[in-house]
Image: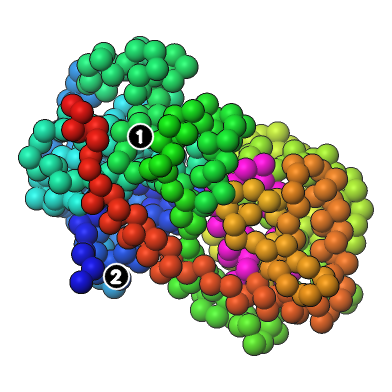
C-alpha cells in the first residue's frame, strides 16, 4: 500500500486567503489535491490584514506564544480553519505587529519592500516550526515555498537538527521564482539567531556579501524543485536565469526536480465558472462569443458587427513578463486589426506606458491597472488570444487557464511556457498555441501576425481551440509527481545531518 504522509505545507500566500501571484494558486490547490490522495496536510501562512476572519470562520487554536528574533521576543497566536471538503487544516500565524498591514510584502507608501521583511519572515519561520511541535504534528515532509519560508529548512537543519521531534522529518524547498531571493544586509544576520559559523564568504547564508534566505533554503533542503522541467534546467544554465544561484543549483543538481503546476478546474473552467456571465464547453462555444461581447462592454471597448480579434493580457507589470518587448513594437502592434484588454499592476514605468498608449488608442486598448479576480476570469473567457511573451517564466498559470477557456496563448519558449504550449503547425493542425523562440520584439510581432492570420480561417481556429481545451493540466497529475518526490525524499539518507 502506498504510504500516506504528514505534510506541513508552509507558504507566504495561499488562495483564497491572500494572493499576490501564482504561488498562492499553487498553495491553494496542491494541499487539497494531496489530501484527496489520503495524505494528512496542514498549511501554515501569516495572518495578514487581508485574510478575512469572519468569511473563512477563523478560530483561535493556540494563544500567548512567542519566538525570539533580533534579540527580542515577539508574541503571536495561532488561528485556524478547516476546509471541510478536503479536510486540509489552515493555520495562521497571527502577529499583528508584523502582518496586520495593508500589503503583503511592499510598503505602499514607500513603494519598496517593508523594511523589516527579514524579521517578519524569521518570526514566521520560527513560529511555523514551534506550531508543529505544539500541535504534536510530526511532519514526514516539511514543504516550504520561496524565500519567505526557506528559513524553516535552515532552522530544521541547524537549531533543530537534533530535536527528537523532527528526527524523521525531511524537507522540500519549492522555488516558484528565483528572482525573488530575500537578500538582506550582512549586519542583519544576527537577527536570525544563528552562529557566525554559518555566515562567512561562500557559507550557506552568504550571497555576494548579503544574507540570503533563498540560498540557505537551496543549501539545506533535502530536495529542491521548481515548477517546470525547463525552468529547472534554465536556472542552472546561466546567470540570466539563475540570478547568481546557478553555481549552487548545479552543485545540488541531483536533488533538483521540475514539476509543472496544475490548475484548479473547480475554479478555472468555463463549464462551472461562476464569475463569467455565460458558461460554455468544448462542444459549444456560443457562450464564449457572448462573453467576448460582455468583456468588450465591461472594458469600455466598442462592440462592432465585424469580428475583430481580441487579445487578453493579465500580468504583473514587470520586466520579467516581456513588457519591454511590447514597448518596442507598440506602434506596429496597435496598427494591426485587433483589440487588446490589459489587466495588471506593477512597475510605474509600465503603468505610464499603458496609460499613454490608451490615450492614443482608446478604441483599441483597454487598460485596467488594478488587481481584479473577476475581471481576470472574464478576460480568460472573452478573449480570443492570450499574450505572455515572458523573458523567463517558472511555470505560468494564465497560459494554462487560457487553454481551458479556448483562448489561444501566444507565448515565448521559456520555462513552463515551453513545457505546456505546443506551437501550432498549420500543415497538420497539431498544436495548442503560438510559440516564439528568441526574446526579440519582432519575433513576437511576427507570431502575433501569424495568430491573427489563423484566426481568420474559422475552421482552423476552431480546431486549435478544440486542441487547447482538451489539454489536461489538472492538479491530480502534478500532485502525483509531488507524492513521488516526497517518497524519494523521505527514503533518502540525510547527508547533511550525518556529516554534522
Ligand atoms: P506570477 O506568479 O509570476 O505573477 P503566474 O502566471 O504564475 O505569474 O500567476 C499569476 C496569477 O495571478 C494568475 O492566477 C493571474 O490570473 C493572477 N493575476 C496577476 N495579475 C492579476 C491582476 N491584476 N488581477 C487579477 N489577477 C491577477
Give x and y (percent) for residue 7.
Answer: 24, 55
Residue 445 in sight in this render: yes
Q: Residue furthest bottom?
A: 283
Q: Is residue 108 or residue 475 the one in the foreground? A: 475
Is 216 positioned to the left or the right of 440 in the image? left
At 23% from the left and 24% from the top, the residue drawn is 69
> Vertically, is 368 above or below 130?
below
Give x and y (percent) for residue 362.
Answer: 83, 53
Picture quarter with the N terminus = bottom left
Q: Is residue 439 or residue 235 the one in the foreground? A: 235
Is 320 positioned to the left or the right of 158 in the image? right
At 67% from the left and 46% from the top, the residue drawn is 390
Q: Which residue is mark 2?
A: 37
Distance between mark 2 and mark 1 Cα atoms: 27 Å
Q: Which residues are magenta?
A: 381-404
Give x and y (percent) for residue 133.
Answer: 11, 44
Q: Which residue is mark 1?
A: 217
Amino acid at each position: 500500500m502506498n504510504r500516506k504522509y504528514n505534510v506541513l505545507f508552509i507558504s507566504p500566500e495561499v488562495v483564497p486567503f491572500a494572493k499576490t501571484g501564482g504561488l498562492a494558486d499553487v498553495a491553494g490547490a496542491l494541499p487539497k489535491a494531496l489530501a484527496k490522495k489520503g495524505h494528512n496536510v496542514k498549511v501554515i501562512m501569516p495572518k495578514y490584514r487581508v485574510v478575512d476572519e469572519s468569511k473563512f470562520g477563523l478560530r483561535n487554536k493556540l494563544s500567548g506564544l512567542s519566538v525570539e528574533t533580533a534579540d527580542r521576543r515577539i508574541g503571536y497566536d495561532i488561528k485556524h480553519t478547516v476546509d471541510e471538503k478536503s479536510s486540509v487544516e489552515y493555520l495562521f500565524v497571527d502577529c499583528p505587529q508584523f502582518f496586520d498591514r495593508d500589503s503583503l510584502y511592499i510598503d505602499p507608501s514607500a513603494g519598496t519592500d517593508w523594511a523589516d521583511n527579514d524579521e517578519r519572515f524569521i518570526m514566521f519561520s520560527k513560529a511555523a516550526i514551534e506550531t508543529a511541535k505544539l500541535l504534536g504534528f510530526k511532519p514526514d515532509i516539511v514543504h516550504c515555498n520561496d524565500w519567505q519560508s526557506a528559513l524553516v529548512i535552515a532552522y530544521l537543519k541547524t537549531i533543530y537538527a537534533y530535536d527528537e521531534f523532527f528526527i524523521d522529518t525531511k524537507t522540500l524547498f519549492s522555488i516558484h521564482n528565483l528572482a525573488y531571493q530575500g537578500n538582506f544586509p550582512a549586519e542583519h544576520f544576527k537577527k536570525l539567531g544563528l552562529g557566525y559559523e554559518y555566515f562567512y564568504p561562500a557559507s550557506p547564508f552568504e550571497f555576494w556579501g548579503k544574507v540570503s534566505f533563498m540560498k540557505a533554503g537551496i543549501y539545506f533542503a533535502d530536495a529542491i524543485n521548481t515548477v517546470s522541467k525547463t525552468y529547472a534546467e534554465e536556472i542552472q544554465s546561466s546567470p540570466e536565469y539563475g540570478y547568481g544561484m546557478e553555481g549552487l543549483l548545479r552543485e545540488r543538481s541531483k536533488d533538483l526536480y521540475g514539476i509543472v503546476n496544475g490548475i484548479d478546474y473547480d475554479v478555472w473552467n468555463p463549464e462551472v465558472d461562476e464569475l463569467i456571465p455565460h458558461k460554455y464547453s468544448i462542444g459549444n462555444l456560443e457562450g464564449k462569443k457572448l462573453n467576448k461581447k460582455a468583456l468588450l462592454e465591461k472594458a469600455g471597448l466598442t462592440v462592432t458587427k465585424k469580428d475583430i480579434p481580441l487579445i487578453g493580457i493579465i500580468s504583473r507589470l514587470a520586466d520579467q513578463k516581456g513588457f519591454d518587448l511590447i514597448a518596442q513594437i507598440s506602434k506596429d502592434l496597435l496598427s494591426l486589426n485587433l483589440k487588446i484588454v490589459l489587466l495588471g499592476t506593477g512597475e510605474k514605468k509600465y503603468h505610464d506606458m499603458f496609460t499613454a498608449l490608451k490615450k492614443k488608442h482608446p478604441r483599441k486598448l483597454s487598460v485596467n491597472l488594478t488587481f481584479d479576480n473577476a475581471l481576470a476570469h472574464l478576460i480568460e473567457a472573452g478573449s480570443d488570444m492570450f499574450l505572455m511573451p515572458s523573458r523567463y517564466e517558472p511555470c505560468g498559470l494564465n497560459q494554462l487557464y487560457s487553454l481551458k477557456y479556448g483562448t489561444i496563448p501566444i507565448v515565448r519558449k521559456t520555462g513552463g511556457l515551453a513545457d505546456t504550449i505546443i506551437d501550432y503547425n498549420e500543415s497538420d493542425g497539431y498544436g495548442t498555441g503560438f510559440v516564439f523562440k528568441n526574446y526579440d520584439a519582432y519575433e513576437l510581432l511576427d507570431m502575433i501576425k501569424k495568430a491573427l492570420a489563423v484566426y481568420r480561417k474559422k475552421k482552423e481556429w476552431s480546431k486549435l481551440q478544440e486542441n487547447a481545451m482538451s489539454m489536461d493540466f489538472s492538479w491530480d497529475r502534478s500532485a502525483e509527481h509531488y507524492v513521488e518526490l516526497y517518497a524519494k525524499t523521505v527514503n533518502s539518507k540525510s547527508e547533511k545531518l550525518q556529516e554534522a
